[in-house]
C-alpha cells in the first residue's frame, strides 16, 4: 500500500514537473541551466529548444535544436540546429546563461562551447524561446526596456520560418542564408544554399556559389515567376532594402492556415514547403533553362535533351562498375560526373552515409537484381512530350506536416 502511494507520488511529481517545463518555462534567466532532459518551449508550445539526436541521421548526431511542434506529444521537426559542424555528446550537455550574460553549452568532460559572449560582462540577461521560432538573448535595462544581444534567426540552418530573413545585414555585414544537409543522413553543412539576391530581387539556389536555380522576379501579382502559383499563394513576401539591410522573408496571409509554414532545402537542392515544391536544383543539368534552371555548360554530346536520371530500387551488377571513394563526393557530384561521362549510365552512393559514388556502365544496368532494395539512379530516355517534365528524384528531406 505504502509502496503504491510512493509510486503514485513519484508519477505525480514526474508528470507535474514535465508539464511545468513544457508549458510554462519559456525562458532561461541569468544563472539558470537547461540540461539534456529538459525542454524550453515557447508560450503556446509551438516551438521548443532542446538537446536532441537528429531524425534521419545514421550515426549519433546530437545537437542543440529548435523543433516545430503540432502539439505537446509530437516530437517535432527540427527547424534549427546550433553549429551543425560540431555535433555534441548530449548526455552531459547543459545549456547555461551565466550571471555575466554568457550563453554557452557546458559538458562534464569537454571544453565548453560559447554561443554568445559580450566583450564586457552584462548583468541582467534573459534567453527566451519565442512563439515565432526565434530564440533570443536579451539584456534587461533598469528602465524596463530590453535590447537584443543574440538571436537564432541570425544563424539560419536549412529551414526558413515566417519572419526569419534571408539576405544581408548591412550594419554588421552578416549574411543570412540556408545551407542544406551534406547527405540525407549527415546534418553537417552541405552543398546547396538558398540565398536572397537583392540586386535582382530573386531567390537563388546555389551549389558551392554557382547558381543552379532562380526564383525569377516578383510579378505584379506579388508572386515569383518560376515558383508554381499554387505553392506560394499563402505567402506574403516582405522585401526590405535600405541602408541597414537587404532582406527577404515571408509571412502567412491566412490566419487560419493549417500547414507547417516552413521552407526547407534538401541535400539534393530541392526547396519545398508543406504545399509542395518551390524550386528544385536537382532538375538542373547545366544546359536546360526550364523551371528556373540556370545554364552553366553545354549538354554532353552523348546525352539528349530531356534525358534525366530516374530513381530505381535494385542492385546493378558491380562487375562493370567503377568507384569514387572520395568522401567529399555526394549525390549531386556523383550525378554530374555520371552525366558528363559517356560511359556512365547510372550511379549510387558508395558509403552508407551518402558519400562517395559507384558509377554503373550500361552493362551493369542491364543486369540488375531487382530483389535487392538498393536505391540507385539510372538514365531515362526523354519522353516524347515536354522536355520540362522531369521525374522527381533525389533524397529529399522534406518537412510535410499539418498543424492540428
Ligand atoms: C526554468 O527552467 C530552468 C531550467 O530547467 C530551471 O532551473 C528554472 O527553475 C525554471 N524556472 C521556473 C520559473 O520554473
Ligand atoms: C537525464 O535522465 C536520465 C534518465 O532518466 C538520467 O540517467 C540522467 O542522469 C539525466 N541527466 C541529467 C543531466 O539530469
Ligand atoms: C500530435 O502529434 C502527433 C505526431 O505528429 C500526432 O501523431 C498526433 O495525432 C497529434 N495529436 C493531436 C491531439 O493532434
Ligand atoms: C560566465 O562564463 C564565462 C565563459 O565561460 C566566464 O569567463 C565567466 O567568468 C562566467 N561568469 C560567471 C559570473 O560565472
Ligand atoms: C551588476 O549588478 C550588481 C549587483 O546587482 C551591481 O552592483 C553592479 O553595479 C551591476 N553592474 C553593472 C555593470 O550594471
Ligand atoms: C533604457 O536604458 C537603456 C540603457 O541604459 C538606454 O539605452 C535606453 O535608451 C533607455 N530607454 C528609455 C526609453 O529610457
Ligand atoms: C555575404 O555575401 C556577399 C555576397 O553574397 C559576399 O560578398 C560576402 O563576402 C558575404 N559576407 C560574409 C560575411 O560572408
Ligand atoms: C577529394 O575530392 C576533393 C574535391 O574534388 C579534392 O579536393 C580532394 O583532393 C580529393 N581527395 C582525395 C583524397 O582524392
Ligand atoms: C561517411 O562514411 C565514410 C566511410 O565510413 C567515412 O570515412 C566518412 O568520414 C563519413 N563522413 C562523415 C561526414 O561522417
Ligand atoms: C558491354 O556490353 C557490350 C554490348 O552492349 C559488349 O560489347 C561489351 O563487351 C560489354 N562489356 C563488358 C566489359 O562485358
Image (cartoon, rainbow, N blue to C red):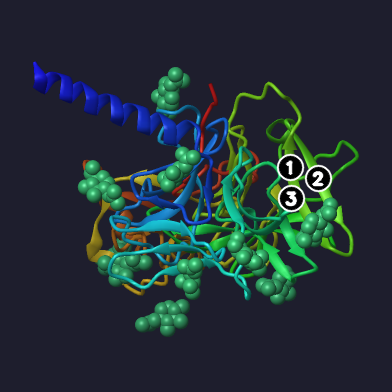
Looking at marks 1 and 2 on the same chain, the residue that comes earlier in the sequence is marked by: 2
Which residue occupies 68% across, 55% down?
293
Crowding near pointer 2: few (<14 within 10 Å), some, many (20+)?
A: few
- Above or below, 276 against 12 in this view is below
Q: How many marks?
A: 3
Task: Find the distance from the CA under tag 3 to the CA under tag 2.
Answer: 15 Å
State if disc 2 and disc 1 touch (CB < 8 Å): yes
Which image quadrant is residue 256 in? top right
Task: Find the distance from the CA under tag 1 to the CA under tag 3.
Answer: 14 Å
Looking at marks 1 and 3 on the same chain, the residue that comes earlier in the sequence is marked by: 3
The answer to whether 218 appears left or right of 380 in the picture is right
Judging by the rendered image, the residue that carries numbered circle 2 is 238
Judging by the rendered image, the residue that carries numbered circle 3 is 215
Judging by the rendered image, the residue that carries numbered circle 1 is 250
The outermost residue toward the top is 1
- Above or below, 352 against 53 in this view is below
The answer to whether 25 appears left or right of 219 in the picture is left
Mark 3 element type: loop
Mark 2 element type: strand
Examine the rendering and report whether any part of residue 36 can be seen.
Answer: yes
Tell me where residue 1 appears, x and y as whole percent.
Answer: 8, 16
- Above or below, 391 against 33 in this view is above
Looking at marks 3 and 2 on the same chain, the residue that comes earlier in the sequence is marked by: 3
Amino acid at each position: 500500500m505504502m509502496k503504491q502511494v510512493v509510486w503514485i507520488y513519484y508519477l505525480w511529481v514526474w508528470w507535474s514537473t514535465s508539464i511545468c517545463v513544457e508549458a510554462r518555462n519559456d525562458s532561461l534567466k541569468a544563472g539558470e541551466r537547461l540540461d539534456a532532459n529538459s525542454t524550453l518551449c515557447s508560450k503556446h508550445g509551438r516551438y521548443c529548444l532542446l538537446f536532441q539526436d537528429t531524425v534521419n541521421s545514421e550515426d549519433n548526431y546530437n545537437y542543440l535544436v529548435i523543433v516545430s511542434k503540432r502539439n505537446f506529444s509530437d516530437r517535432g521537426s527540427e527547424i534549427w540546429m546550433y553549429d551543425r559542424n560540431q555535433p555534441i555528446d548530449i548526455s552531459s550537455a547543459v545549456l547555461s546563461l551565466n550571471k555575466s550574460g554568457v550563453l554557452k553549452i557546458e559538458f562534464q568532460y569537454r571544453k565548453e562551447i560559447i554561443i554568445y559572449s559580450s566583450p564586457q560582462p552584462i548583468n541582467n540577461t534573459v534567453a527566451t524561446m519565442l512563439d515565432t521560432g526565434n530564440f533570443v538573448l536579451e539584456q534587461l535595462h533598469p528602465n524596463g526596456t530590453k535590447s537584443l544581444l543574440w538571436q537564432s534567426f541570425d544563424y539560419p540552418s536549412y529551414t526558413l520560418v515566417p519572419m526569419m530573413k534571408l539576405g544581408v545585414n548591412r550594419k554588421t555585414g552578416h549574411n543570412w542564408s540556408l545551407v542544406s544537409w551534406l547527405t540525407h543522413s549527415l546534418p553537417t553543412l552541405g552543398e546547396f544554399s538558398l540565398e536572397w539576391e537583392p540586386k535582382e530581387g530573386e531567390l537563388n539556389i546555389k551549389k558551392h556559389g554557382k547558381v543552379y536555380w532562380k526564383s525569377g522576379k516578383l510579378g505584379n501579382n506579388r508572386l515569383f515567376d518560376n515558383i508554381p502559383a499554387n505553392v506560394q499563394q499563402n505567402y506574403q513576401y516582405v522585401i526590405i532594402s535600405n541602408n541597414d539591410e537587404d532582406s527577404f522573408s515571408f509571412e502567412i496571409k491566412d490566419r487560419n492556415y493549417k500547414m507547417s509554414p516552413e521552407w526547407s532545402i534538401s541535400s539534393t537542392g530541392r526547396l519545398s514547403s508543406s504545399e509542395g515544391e518551390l524550386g528544385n536544383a536537382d532538375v538542373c543539368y547545366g544546359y536546360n533553362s526550364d523551371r528556373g534552371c540556370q545554364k552553366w555548360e553545354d549538354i554532353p554530346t552523348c546525352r539528349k535533351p530531356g534525358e534525366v536520371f530516374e530513381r530505381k530500387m535494385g542492385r546493378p551488377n558491380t562487375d562493370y562498375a567503377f568507384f569514387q571513394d572520395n568522401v567529399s563526393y555526394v549525390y549531386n557530384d556523383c550525378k554530374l560526373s555520371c552525366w558528363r561521362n559517356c560511359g556512365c549510365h547510372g550511379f549510387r552512393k558508395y558509403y552508407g552515409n551518402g558519400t562517395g559514388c559507384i558509377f554503373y556502365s550500361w552493362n551493369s544496368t542491364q543486369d540488375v537484381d531487382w530483389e535487392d532494395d538498393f536505391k540507385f539512379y539510372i538514365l531515362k530516355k526523354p519522353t516524347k512530350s515536354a522536355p520540362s517534365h522531369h521525374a522527381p528524384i533525389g533524397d529529399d528531406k522534406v518537412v510535410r506536416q499539418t498543424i492540428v
